[in-house]
Amino acid sequence: MSGPLLERELQASLAVLDRRGFLRLTGLAAAAGLLPAGCGEAPAGLRPPPGLVLRVLTPRSYATFQAAALRILGPAGRALADAGAIDVAGRADGRLATLPAFAGLVQQALLALEFGVWPLVPKLRPFTALPEEGRDQVLRGLATARLDLSRALFRGVRSFTWLAYYSAIQSHAAIAYPGPFGGPGASVHDAMTYDPTL
Amino acid sequence: MVIGTGAGGGPTAARLAEAGLEVVVLESGPHLDARDFNGVEGEMFFRLGRFAATDDGSLNLYAGHCVGGSTVVNDALCWRTPPEVLARWREEHGLAPLSDAALAPFVDRVWRDVGATPTRRAYLNRNAHALERGAHRLGWAAEPMARNVRGCLNLGLCNLGCPSNAKQSTLVTYVPRAVAAGARLLPLMHAERLLHEGGRAQGVVATRLDPVSGAPAGELTVRAPLVCVAAGVLETGALLLRSGLRGRRGTAGQGLQFHSSVHVTARFAEPIHGYFGPTMAYAISEFADVLGHRGPGFMIENTAVHPLVTAQNLPGFGEEHERAMAALPFLAKAVVVLRDRTRGRVRLDRAGRAAFGYALLPEDLARMGEGMRAAARAYLAAGALEVWLPMDGVAPVRSERELDALADRVPRQAELFSLYAVHLFGGAAMGGGPAQGFCSVEGEAFDVSGLYVVDAAGLPGNTGANPQVTIMANALRIAEGIAARGVRA
């Protein structure tokens, strides 16, 4: 069996976070105003679109996820998101609604990303308050952190971004994926040509 | 009573029903069929299976959760049970009766029942050819694998639910046979605990699940003098533990063993289109330690290049990741399937659900590193432009020299960002006595008569090759014994 990994990776990441209880502490600290961050409204450009009813994420965690996802995606993905073709955080929220066991953990992870500070997350301000370059630096720091927990946090958010993005059919053109049953770009026949060099 | 409809439960239900027994089959997942299989990764993974992770989150697994179980989401690969494995089970687990000759008739029967056939060249896609080309140039032992398909259309969707019914999962073979012979199939019934009294099986208590939300929607008690458990390795172990059945020596849940695996991805100059064609069909067996090979104990097998899973196995983010994914039609991918020496255990979490611990031994991590490098070497020999290893902090490899620089690098488990268990074994294993296993070579629990373990939980260890045929054959062997001995009233 080949390995469908995305959600497993997320669960793996979040299992670490949950087990260590670190995020709960972070969340409590943030809620108590102990971290150098406010809990005010999410930045305007990252808020849920009007009319979207969130099922799991809060407006704040939606904004945090969207802020991370827009940097995790490359330019082509960002262009689709900016154009409103793919609401990555909205799709993630929809998937989370079918995974109640993960919902709380994802909220915790996003809380940690938004309000967590060094040594877990290499920053001193809310993630959504950082400029784009700052968000990239934070994500890069998490991805290469020596602390397994920090890398797990990064992988969890990244995995859910891929899940939300690549499961949207609008993302397929940028990767030349013709869809499960083929399309104008390629068909089954193209994959089955015998290699004459053998 | 049969709990589960996968490689263990399906054949058991069919054989017992065809033997004239009144059979009820419980399945915790939904009953879907080819009309439901739309090939969309992000949808089918969630409809057909469930995910789990080790306590420390560093190793993950995915198991079928539908009628047909993991045979619906596997890649249709068939290997006969390696004789070296049976020899080891006889020697180390006291399973003297489990000879090659004793199992062979059941392997042959499964082979016929599920239409296992060697994969002809016409069914090898470019993804398989890339691996074959590398193995050929390096002089490594490699071959097409047998697959259980009839009339394959090469859609490339084996592991997402075969939309053409070509894959001969238990969903289209043994389960329909069981129903045709009178078995009653009850999907969306999660077995909560086994009923037993005075050392005899009495039945099972199950929770009925809502088909939309999956939430509990009622309870069902089935009284039965014979209970065959095939809920999948984790769930079988958890069910026994929830039922207070730990084995006389605490054997329930112990001895868990995997084929751990990672994916290695390569980019070629020519199109591969690895999302079409058989999802898996070709194996480098040079490094196996079964079927006559004397290697370190891993296989390298080509695997499908669907977007979601491929993205997960590529490092980085942003432009770096997008550049790699933009080359999707040019990517080939292989899975390194390790025959672990590690053992773990199944336990219950605070909510009574299955949990498991599994920390790879250093020697297994070293062999996994060796496997990743071997896969990369094969791709470079085949002409790959670059190869990604699934390790944090490792840049794409573009030459033998760069690969050699990684020769001494033994990955830590937490560094492997896509480590997963592709096959699971044990947790309620057969053994020569209560000290060696949970159940006898006939599959019957030492402590509870009438209770049988018929899935991979009953196997004492891993097989070194894709195990569905072994699981099915062992289930048929146990069911044959039950049918021959009869069931008390």
Image (spheres, helix red, strand yellow):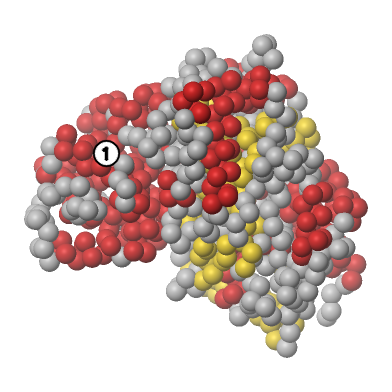
Would residue B42 be found to the left or right of residue B300 on screen? left
Identify which residue, B146 or A165, lies in the foreground. Answer: B146
Subunit under mark 1: A
| Image-quadrant location for residue A194 | top right
Q: Residue at x 21, y 62 (%)?
A: A27
Q: Across the whole image, how many numbered discs are drawn on residues?
A: 1
Q: Residue A11: x, y in percent?
A: 41, 54
Crowding at dot 1, Cα within 10 Å, few <14 / some 14-19 / many 20+, comes out as some
Query: On the image, numbered disc 1 is attached to which residue?
Result: A140
Would residue B173 be found to the left or right of residue B348 on screen? right
| Image-quadrant location for residue B180 | bottom right
Q: Look at the picture and state if A112 lies above or below B41.
A: below
Would residue B406 be found to the left or right of residue B258 on screen? left
Report whether residue B320 is seen: yes
Q: Quadrant of the N terminus of chain A?
A: top right
Q: Residue B391: x, y in percent?
A: 44, 39
Q: Secondary structure at mark 1?
A: helix
Q: Residue B65: x, y in percent?
A: 57, 55
Q: Residue at x 22, y 50 (%)?
A: A121
- Amino acid found under the numbered disc labelled 1: Arg
